Each structure stands twice: as structure tokens, then as C-alpha cells.
Amino acid sequence: MDAYDVPPFDVAVVGGGPVGMWLAAELHRGGVRPVVLERRAERPPYSKALTIYPRTVEQFAMRGLVDRWLAEGTPVPSSHFALLTNRLDFSFLPTRYPFTLFLPQRRTEELLEEHLAELGVPYLRQHAVTGLRQDESGVDLDVDSPGGPAVVRAAYAVGCDGAASVVRAAAGIDFEGTPDTWRTILGDIELTDPPPTPALTLNQPGGSMYMVAIGGGRYRLAVIDHATLHDPVDKPATFAELRASALRLAGTDFGMLQTPDAWLSRVGNAARQAARYRAGRVLLAGDAAHIHYPAGGQGLNLGLQDAANLAWKLAAEIRGWAPPGLLDSYHAERYPVGLDVIDDSLAQCGLIANPTREGVALRDRFNAILGTDPSLCRELAVRLSGLAIRYPAPGQVPPPGQVTLAGRRAADLDLRGAGVPGGSGFPAATLFGLLQPARFVLLNLGSAAAPDLQAGFADRLDTVTAELAGDAGEFAGVRAMLIRPDGYIAWATAADDDPPLDSWLGHALSPGRPRR
């Protein structure tokens, strides 16, 4: 094979779906050189996913991109658990985006590809990775390209290439879990007699049904029909089957039209997770790292959050300032989150796909409990939204009776008198505004100006002195916080302690040391 005749890359991102593109964008913000290798010649016309939850919307807001999604998505102030009729209210969530945002994955991919083009990140179609080898200094990827077989070399490779990941297999990482034991059908269909609300859940003794408007008179329909759960795996999904299931479960087909652009698919209940998210210089994210039944539409959000967690750590490793163990913390932090989503999906499957009398009774009882137990609904809503994710915070031991903020998501706090020394020029009216450059933020909320701690860290840290505008809530009494580039609190104090910069930002640059 001939060496690939392009400039060298720091990271080869294998797979150009939403997770791969978001990872590449975040890596670029971190100051390294990614390339996206996508095997397909063009984007599929259908959309596997369409659910975007509040924490993912916040990720877009942290980078100043959220208006692009809000302008086109459909916000619904609720979601569901196990397709039960009593829905989960999102309106109370402590975020500027207390809703489920529905936008077909195809449009999300288009928006992300447009953003990559703005950043100048190369996105190479018809570049199928067939294998890889790694050594102490990098990874060689075998690629089938339009010009023939080639080798792409990068310092690291990240597999974002889906459930059948070539990268995962080539790295020798096991994909542990269980295979499909049943499958259900879903489709994007035009309706002439749709329900009056943009989202509808139905739960009947014979199964469950979910539909949501996706624009243009089209709806995503998902049916868990107990009569067809165990049809042969290779049986093709048909319009007639989807219509028959809707009639059985809802008593109506909602005026389904069999149009040429209708999309149908079967999805199964396989639940698997990579045994490790890192093998040397090869890492995994998205469906390459975990798969589950799409109960609640959590998969896209889980993958995008993988990307946000990994990117700044990998960039720090490549740029040479990562403290020991930082890159390994990607697996340590994200593996439990992936496992939790898998278990949540399995729990929902236990409710929606059990056709026995016991299963129907359990589903009915749980639905009734949701209708009468607001605290349970709130807990499930917070978990589903992604706002409850918390990462371990070494060394952060709270005083008796108090809960440490470290490891928690940083809310988009309103700030007064905020500014960044040096005239960085990005908006600072809110905390998310400060995070747009994807750097650490040391936010001083004390009455006195913060000491100049930025010397030597200027390439990765912004120090800001501000006051909280409005009700401080749980942040009352906090004098300083160190916020990670992915929007999680690394450290917080109610005293005048110095922040543990070395623990998070490595060693400060000496005056004579060159920066990348």
C-alpha cells in the first residue's frame, strides 16, 4: 500500500455520524488536528434517532450553537418511561431547556457537518477503515479510499463506527452482553388523521405504541406489538404489518399513507457494552462502545456525551499537558454512565415486552404509580434528561451534612460583571458563554478579585471574577469553582482555598516552553 498523501493528523475519527462529527469538532476546539473517515458515499435518507435531551441541548449551548437546533426542532415538555401513558413532566427541570427536542438525526448530521466545514475539519467520505495497527507513537489505519487502498497514520484513533465497529474488533476489545431475543418495528410515516398532540404514548394489554411529529405531516411510529415480538429476525418490515399493529393497539391507523419515502425498520433488544473504552491509542465512543434497545431514545445523547467527555482529555494528552490518568478517566467516567443507560433500557423492556398476565399487571401497576407519585416521576425525568450525570471527584469530601458540587454538571448561571482578562472577546453574561472556547474556567465568586493564577495555564484556562445574578440557590456561599471544558464542576469551595490546578491542568508552561 502507498502512504496516504495528506498532512499528518493527531486523531483519526472513524465514523462520520453525529458522535464522530461532534468528537471531531470538540477535538478541533481543544487545539488538535482531527480527520473524519466515513465509509458511506452519502448520508442515508432516513433517521435512526430523533430525540435530543436537555443535557445534550446544553452541550450545544456551551459552544454557542444551540439556536441552530432550536430553530428546527420540535420541543415537547415531557417524555415517557417504558411507553407508559402517564408521561414524565420536564417543565420543572433546572435548565434553560426543560423539554425533549425532536429533530431527525439526518438534520442533526447536516448541521454538524456544516459546523465541521466552518471549523475546517476534513470529512472524508468513501473512506472505509478495514483494519489497524498501533505502536508506541501512533496508529496506522488501513483504508479503502476512492484512490485505492491506503494507510492513514494518526497519533490516536477513535472508533465511532457503530455496533459492528471495525475499530473495536481490530483493537481486540470484547463487546459483552446479550443478543436480540425479540424485535419490534418502527417507521416514519405520513398521517392524514394524526393525534392532536405532537407526541402520543399508548399502552394496551397487547403492547405499546409511541408516535411523535417529525415535520411535514410525518410521524415516527414505534410499536411493541406482543403479537409480532418473536417473528423471524430476517422477516422484512412492511407497511401492512405496521398498520395492522397500529389497528390492534390503537383501534386506528391514524390515516397512514404508504408513500415512496416511508421508512421502516426493525430494532432488537440486544444490550452490549465494550469491556473497555480504551486499548492503548485506540478509543471507542457511541454505538461502538454500547448498544441497547432505543427505549426513551437515549442512544444519540449517550454517544454525544461520550464525545464531549473524551475530546478535551484526548486533546490534553496530545498537547502534552494532561495530568497522569486523565485519559484513562474517560473509561472510568463514561463506562458506568453507559451501563446505567443499558440497565435503564432493560428495565423498560421488562415492562413493555412481557406479554404474560404478570407482565401486563406489572405494567399497569407501574403506570398507576407514575400517575400518583410525583417524586418518582421527577427522579425518572431528571435521570432521562441527562442532568443527573455525576462524575467522581477525587479528594472532594463535603463537610458533614453538605453535598459537594464537584463532579456535578454546571448549570448555566447568570453572571453580573463577568469578564475575561486579556480581552478574549466571547460573551460572558452566562456561564455557558464562558465555556464557548472549550477551556477550563476558574470562576471567582468572592468579593475580592481572584489572584492571578492563569500564568502558565493561559493556553487552557480562563480566570473570571463575577457575581451571581438572581437567586444563588445551591451556589450560595460558593466562593470559587473550576469548571471543566465539558461543563462539569472539577472543584468548588466556600473558603479561600487555592484551586488544585495541577491536578486538572497538569504542569504550568514555563516561559520558554513552546506551545502547540
Image (tube, rainbow, N blue to C red):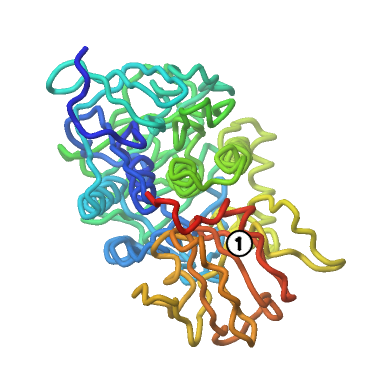
Decide if residue 398 is on the left or right side of residue 408. right
Residue at image location 48% in from the left, 82% down from the top: 418
Question: Image quadrant of residue 247?
Answer: top left
- Which quadrant holds the N terminus? top left
Decide if residue 113 is on the left or right side of residue 504. left
Residue at the far front in the pictured view? 512
Residue at the far left in the pictured view? 147
Residue at image location 47% in from the left, 42% down from the top: 314
Residue at image location 32% in from the left, 42% down from the top: 33
From this view, report whether residue 355 is shown above or below residue 87. above
From this view, report whether residue 186 is shown above or below residue 94. above
Where is residue 282 shown, x and y percent of the image? 46, 28
Residue at the far right in the pictured view? 400
Decide if residue 194 is on the left or right side of residue 58. left
Task: Say what secondary structure mark 1 lies in.
Answer: strand
Decide if residue 246 is on the left or right side of residue 449. left
- Looking at the picture, tell me which residue is in the foreground, 63 or 181: 63
Residue at image location 45% in from the left, 80% down from the top: 419
The residue that mark 1 highlights is: 489
- Looking at the picture, tell me which residue is in the foreground, 503 or 260: 503
From this view, report whether residue 337 is shown above or below residue 236. below
Where is residue 40 shown, x and y percent of the image? 22, 29
The 10 Å Cα crowd at callout 1, few under 14, some 14 to 19, many 20 or more, is many
Where is residue 64 shown, x and y percent of the image? 35, 66
Q: Is residue 257 visible?
A: yes
From this view, report whether residue 271 is shown above or below residue 373. above
Q: Is residue 209 visible?
A: no
For the residue marked with disc 1, what is the amino acid? Ile
